[in-house]
Amino acid sequence: MDVGKILQYLVERSRTLSWIMLAIMAGLVVADFLAPSHYDRFFWESVPGFGAIYGFVACVVIIIVSKALGYALLYRPEDYYDD
């Protein structure tokens, strides 16, 4: 089994794989609406699709905070090391 061939196969079919993964994620959100859980500890856990929305918002916040920290602390001008 050659890992390079597997990766090349996945890269060539990336658009199809992206659509498949989006369909799976949408199916999971729909399943959350159809089969609600009955072991909720907090009221927001009973909201259908809350986990997906919370996860998406958390990822967006992580990206925004990391970019802000990068601009504030890490990024330097092109001539930073010049005398």
Image: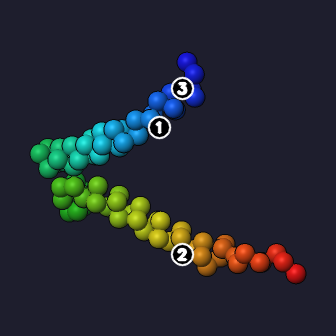
Q: Which residue is mark 2?
A: 68
Marking on residue 5: 3
In this view of the protein, which residue sits in the foreground, 64 or 44? 64
Residue in the picture at 30% in, 39% down = 20
Q: Position of residue 61 (x, y in %)?
A: 42, 68
Q: Position of residue 48 (x, y in %)?
A: 18, 55
Q: Which residue is mark 1?
A: 11
Place residue 21 in its image quadrant. top left
**Helix, strand or loop at mark 2:** helix
Place residue 55 in its image quadrant. bottom left
Residue in the picture at 54% in, 68% down = 66
Mark yes or no: residue 31 visible: yes
Marking on residue 39: none
Q: Position of residue 37 (x, y in %)?
A: 18, 47
Does residue 27 lie above or below 47 as drawn? Answer: above
State the residue lying farthest toward the front.
Answer: 12
**Helix, strand or loop at mark 1:** helix
CA–CA distance in space, label 1 to label 3: 10 Å
Q: Does residue 80 appear to the left or right of 43 in the view shown? A: right
Does residue 59 lie above or below 35 as drawn? Answer: below
CA–CA distance in space, label 1 to label 2: 31 Å
The image shows a total of numbered marks equal to: 3
Q: Select label 1 or label 2 by which is in front.
A: 1
**Helix, strand or loop at mark 3:** helix
Q: Position of residue 41 (x, y in %)?
A: 25, 57
Three-letter amino acid code at disc 2? Ala
CA–CA distance in space, label 2 to label 3: 38 Å
Mark yes or no: residue 37 visible: no
* Marks 1 and 3, the one that precedes in the sequence: 3
Mark 2 neighbour class, 10 Å CA radius: few under 14, some 14 to 19, many 20 or more: few
Mark 3 neighbour class, 10 Å CA radius: few under 14, some 14 to 19, many 20 or more: few
State the residue lying farthest toward the top.
Answer: 1
